[in-house]
Image (cartoon, grey):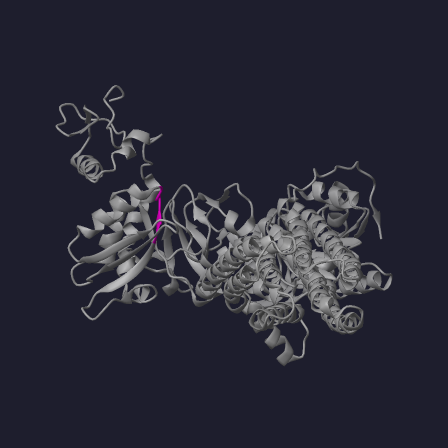
Amino acid sequence: MSDATPCYHCGNPVPAGAPWSISLDEHTHPLCCPGCEAVAHAIVDGGLESYYRYRTELPERPDERQAAKADTWSVFDDPGLQAQFVHPDGDEGNVKATLAIEGITCAACAWLIEHRLNALEGVTSSAVNLTHHRLRVSWNPQQLKLSQLLAELAAIGYDAQPYEPDQAQARMQHEERMNVRRLIIAAVGMMQVMMFSIPIYVSGPGEISDDFYALFHWLSFALATPVVFFSAQPFFRNALRDLRTGVLGMDVPVSLAIGGAYLASSYAVMFNVGEVYFDSVAMFTFFLLFARYVEGRARRRSGHSGNALSGVLPISATRLESDGSERILPASELAPGDRVLIKPGHGVPADGIIEEGESSLDESMLTGEYLPVTRRVGDRITGGSQNMENPLVIRVTHAGRDARVAGIVDLTDRAFASRPRLAQMAARMAHLFVLRLLLVTACVTIAWWFIDPSRMLWVLLSVLVVTCPCALALATPAALTAGHGQLRKRGVLITRADAMETLSNVTRVIFDKTGTLTRGEMQLTQTQPLGELTAERARAIAAALEAHSEHPIARAFRPFRDATLQAKDIHSYTGQGLEGSLNGARWRLGKHEFAVDDAVASSMSAPAKGQWLLLSENGIPRAWFGLHDGVRDDAAATIAALQAQGLNVELLSGDTRDAVESLASQLNITTWHAGTSPEGKLARMKQLQAAGETVVMIGDGINDVPVLAGADVAIAMNGATDLARTRADAVLLSPRLMRIFEAIEISRATRSIMRQNMIWSVCYNVSALPLAAMGLVPPWLAAIGMSLSSLVVVGNALRLSRWRPQPAPTLGTSTPVTA
């Protein structure tokens, strides 16, 4: 078959003696099947034969993953799911929907889609939007199912998904369209008004007759009117809102400038008295709208990755029923406890634990890590990941609004709902600046009334325009948006807006040990029974005590669970261990000081170095358990990079002295504390803060919650407990510790750019004000200067979008000391 003639349409081998062909340019080309023949003839007969003449490669064929999606089409026939995006169309029982189409490249694609669908019985109309790659189709649901439409599209190589923006997206899209229209109207009006104004500026006395003067002025009036009443409408609306609330925003002087210049010019045209400033009005409106449009695009682009999370969960899921059958249903109907089959190429519809299978998962949408990770039986996986290789069966733990993706979106919204201190200061400065600007403008106007009344309005407009604090108002939001976007791209989610500013001033970084510097994947390596208790029985009792614990140590005992052993009245002592009743005895598992009485504990010691837990029965030692937790791959590099930044790094752990000392020595941490209780950790935090240090705490467990709450900036690991994440100011979505180093670098860069923007804004306004007050800046130049100052601020903030981490330094080792 390798020597067979390829199909002219799709490239597949043509079977020997195949009768299918297409004639083009006086040549006959072989085809492999009737389907290719039908499509090829449809393309040529439709006058689109240039598709074959100018194509550079064969069309992409559906791969196995696309084929795997075919069995999910039936889910779109679910009435509950269709209610979200299928709507009535007319009174004849027809319905309509908008579909997002992948693979559209040219007008031939649009023609082929419409031609194929319109030929189906039951389809009343179909139209492709080439710009946005969307298909609007209307059909009779009694004659045709939606799944059949999707199957027809897939048969000709186009993958389709429902497109139904939510209300917020619809409002945003409508506002964006209106902004573009306002900008276009302002641009056209500016160009045309300038065309009539230039002859007046360059002509000498008597070169233009009074009639032409009047004509040019009336034409400028007609062109400037839609610019003022349509393009500049947001400025007037926002100014009225500011006046009602008693807050003087930057739209107040802008509205005064535009409205004053337009009214004065209109009066001059109608009564042939004074000067005309329509060119300045149109130019000022255009430049200000353009600056805000660029700033808005930058903000949306920086926040795009965060917004994309809200739609990352797949629409459908394959649930395994109790009888072993498969049922395809909307992912929104999944509930905790459901068993779900995830085929290769499909998305994970909910958070869950793998019960069957092993595969690689793409978690880049959530963590920023582009390399797939391998997940096995017992591992937790997050909704929104993509299954790459083998089928998996998971047990759902969180679905819908309870899924981790939804939590990330909520945390992001919480961060953007508040503003850091520097941003609040900039907003107050802008408010005070506007108030002072209006007072200065009044004084300048009175002065020019006595100096030269004919230039008074001209100077008034220049002062209002050139000193408009747009750049000052944009200085911090633009930088913060870009900084948040860069952090999110790298797998760091800021949940409190003030955290970024505080992170840039940090002087000390404190790490917890288990689950932070280590992987948190504890393994039971040794069991040493004491007395008559067997090692197997000791492990089963310990597993029964740890059965309901979320601590990483509990995972080490899960393989040894015995269903016949059920511990009761379990109490957890944070940082110490567990206590519970089993077979009428009181058992304890934890540090040996906790498991036995003080008198017994003083005479005992762990069998060897490392992390050991003691199991006791009614205060009598029964068994030692040796545990091991591997160090994270990039822990040493992260510590070295933070120390090279000039930061003090500290290890604060509740584990034994031997375990903590060994890890500190391995990672070159010179300040460490072992056997510290949660209260002790918090006391250490307060001690450092009282000494004037700004402290970042990184942890993951319930025992870290108090110290996380007390830290200047609290960072929760990606595998942290829910309580730890809610108390944190930032959450690592990636397991890589190096993201902490990058987060500090990005925060410092953001702070630097915010300060640069504020300095530039203040210097510009302070220097421009006296020039405008002296009458040296005409209104058109004031409009350009103000707009350029805003664009400089936005452009400077966008440098964060191109930020790249510096190579992490490495440091030599030294002997750690106890603090």
Residue at 31%, 67% (x, y): give it. Answer: 83
Classify the position of the N terminus by image quarter: top left
Where does the image place residue 688, in percent across and percent down from the top left?
A: 83, 60
The segment highlighted magenta reads 100-105
Work out whether 753 lies above or below 274: above
Q: Is residue 377 left or right of residue 296?
A: left
Residue at 59%, 53% (x, y): give it. Answer: 199
Residue at 59%, 59% (x, y): give it. Answer: 279
Residue sitting at the far right: 691
Is residue 15 something one can see in this rendering?
yes
Using the rendered view, name the quadrant where residue 350 is placed.
bottom left
Where does the image place residue 101, in percent across and percent down from the top left?
A: 34, 50
Where does the image place residue 624, in percent across and percent down from the top left?
A: 66, 52
Q: Is residue 608 left or right of residue 527?
A: right
Which of the two residues, 771 or 678, is positioned nearer the viewer here? Answer: 771
In magenta stretch: residue 719: no
Using the rendered view, name the quadrant where residue 23 is placed.
top left
Which of the two residues, 276 or 25, is positioned nearer the viewer here? Answer: 276
Residue at 62%, 60% (x, y): give it. Answer: 280
In magenta stretch: residue 101: yes
Q: Is residue 319 left or right of residue 303?
A: left
Where does the image place residue 649, in percent across and percent down from the top left?
A: 78, 50
Residue sitting at the far top: 3
Is residue 515 something one can see in this rendering?
no
How many numbered circles are shown?
Answer: 0
Which of the two residues, 136 or 599, is positioned nearer the viewer here? Answer: 136
